[in-house]
Amino acid sequence: MKPGSSRSTLVVLASFLLAGAVVGMIRLRAPSSASLPPAPAEMAGTVTGPAWGYDPEGQQVDPLASMDGPAVVLLFMGIECPISNGYAPGIRRLHEEYAAEGVQFWVVYPDAGTSMEAIVKHRAEFQLPPQVLHDPQHSLVARSRVSVTPEAAVFLPGGRLIYHGRIDNRHAGFGSSRPEATEHDLRDVLQRIVKGEAIAPASTRAVGCYIPRVS
């Protein structure tokens, strides 16, 4: 083989190898199906499995087991999360308005390191809805598909998850907020439910403090 032909062969071989490496990198970076957001049909399905937390007396309670109203709202809160605490007045207003329509509200504390004594004190201090649960095993976190505090999940009778995500759009990101919210996602969902209007399952990205994983 002539020297020039040898160099040409090496160049072609190197080009093939480089192209293969690029394709491999693209494949490695492609998002897996597990990292994609759930499709609406999947999110709206009746969820099975355990869904319980501990009440202040230490009893296991499933807030979705005995729904006698149009919806159940689970509000995930963090004691030391400033964004979460900043939503307390808005949560009180929502509770006052929609509890009268039969909507049940539960305040859920998902941090396994939070004591029940601290939970009871926090609820009273911020005048949150009276029904509280500690979710140290994250069974309610999993069923609600939440990841931060504050975050809301709305269930219809039968345990159907119809909404999970932000309360409103006041916080666009960490360090980025509006003086007043311009979109009131949770209120809009509840308003449509109590009016008996058809509602499609939906989710939004909530901004807040990440819920610590259970080890």
Image: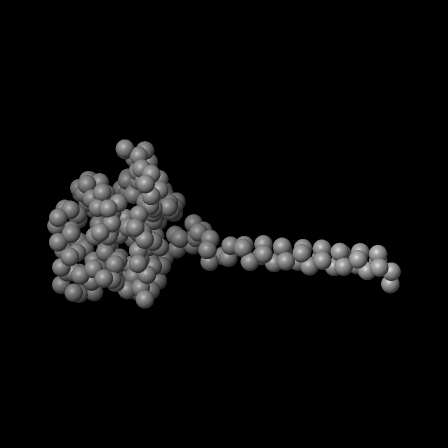
**Residue 76 at x, y = what percent?**
26, 52
Q: Residue at x 24, y 46 (%)?
A: 82
Q: Quadrant of the N terminus?
A: bottom right
Q: Quadrant of the C terminus?
A: bottom left
Q: Residue at x 13, y 48 (%)?
A: 125
Q: Residue at x 87, y 60 (%)?
A: 2
Judged left or right of residue 154, residue 20 is right
User: 135 and 193: which one is in front?
Assistant: 135
Q: Quadrant of residue 170?
A: top left
Q: Quadrant of residue 100?
A: top left
| Residue 195 visible within the image | no
**Residue 117 at x, y = what percent?**
13, 59
Q: Quadrant of residue 27?
A: bottom right
Residue ranking furthest to the front: 3
| Residue 177 visible within the image | yes
Judged left or right of residue 98, residue 143 is right
**Residue 5 at x, y = what percent?**
84, 58
User: 124 and 190: which one is in front?
Assistant: 124
User: 142 and 21: which one is in front?
Assistant: 21
